[in-house]
Amino acid sequence: MADEPMAGEPMADEPSARDIAAAWRPERPGRRGPKEIADALVEPDWGGLRVVAALTVDGAALLRDGKDVTVPDELPRALVDAFTAVNAVIEGRITTKALQSGEGARPAMQKIERPPILIPRVITRSVKDDPYIKARDYEKRAAAIEPQVLEALEQGERHAFVATDLLWLDGTPLDDVPLLERKRLLDGALEPSFLVRVTPFVKPSAILTLVTWGQLGFGDLSYRAANSRYTPGAENPDWAVTRPPVGPQGPSREPVSKS
């Protein structure tokens, strides 16, 4: 009788988490504005390096464009410690911003956010705020910062991993599963810690949170339709990127919650 695979290993005819991660190509923001995204989920953009984590019960690898990303040894160990499933491919960001903020550090309680007392100021938009130009500039900025992040990682600088999406879980591809369900499964696959976070998200009506994210230094917000599917290697028409709203009041002290 042939040896059975060990925990976390795929069957002989199944691709491994690493195979899936190596073949992964990211989706890109589409050409519609945030107000055109139906039933949007809004989350902060963490900057840093966009990668996928290939996880099993006893190992973790971080890949970008099919190649391993060199990271301090503590980060793969933290990912294995945080992982609660058998195998998975998780999209996320390698970033230092998470180490400067409590965002995503612990599961948030459900709550209803009260409306803001003061309405955020209306800002005159320029041509750069056109959804198509905004998406193009967003991709250019991400590409420009990659060499800096890679150099910092090779020098051993501490970074965190912020999980933003779940692409594959326990042998099952999830790209055709609605975003909100992928988020729910992602919450169950990782236990947040200092080096491993799960990005928070809210509804567009949570204005106080959106303003606060801007005041905390998040330069962009992502609006993705709750029912949207993942579109690997292509534009996703249900994903828009925009700047946070600006409010006249000081930073809110309300805890960030998921709607």
Image (tube, rainbow, N blue to C red):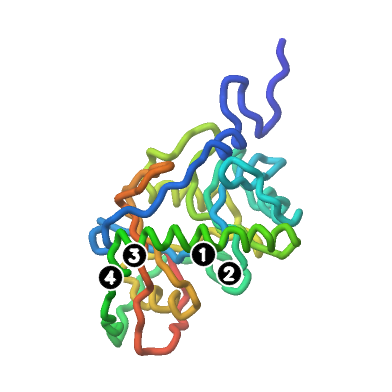
Rendered position, 12 above or below 214: above
Q: CA separation, marks 3 and 1?
A: 18 Å
Q: Nearer the viewer, mark 2 or mark 4?
A: 4
Which quadrant does the C terminus fall into? bottom left
Rendered position, 57 above or below 255: above
Identify the element where label 1 is drawn.
loop
Q: Which residue does the image show at 70% across and 54% down from the upper left?
A: 71
Residue under circle 3?
203
* Numbered circle sitting on residue 46: 1
Q: Name the spot of residue 57 as percent of width and height, x first.
A: 68, 40
Residue under circle 2?
97
Q: How crowded is the residue under tag 1: few (<14 C-alpha within 10 Å), some, or many (20+)? A: many
Q: Are marks 1 and 2 in contact (CB under 8 Å)?
A: yes
Q: Nearer the viewer, residue 233 or 83?
A: 233
Q: CA separation, marks 4 and 3?
A: 26 Å
Q: Which residue does the image show at 56% across and 44% down from the upper left?
A: 65
Q: Nearer the viewer, residue 183 or 163?
A: 163
Q: Are marks 4 and 3 in contact (CB under 8 Å)?
A: no
Going from the N terminus, do you reach mark 4 or mark 3 first? Answer: 4
Q: Amino acid at mark 2?
A: Lys
In the figure, is residue 133 to the left or right of 143?
Answer: left
Q: How crowded is the residue under tag 2: few (<14 C-alpha within 10 Å), some, or many (20+)? A: many
Q: CA separation, marks 1 and 2?
A: 7 Å
Residue under circle 4?
127
Q: Are marks 3 and 2 in contact (CB under 8 Å)?
A: no
Q: Quadrant of residue 206?
A: bottom left
Q: CA separation, marks 2 and 4?
A: 28 Å
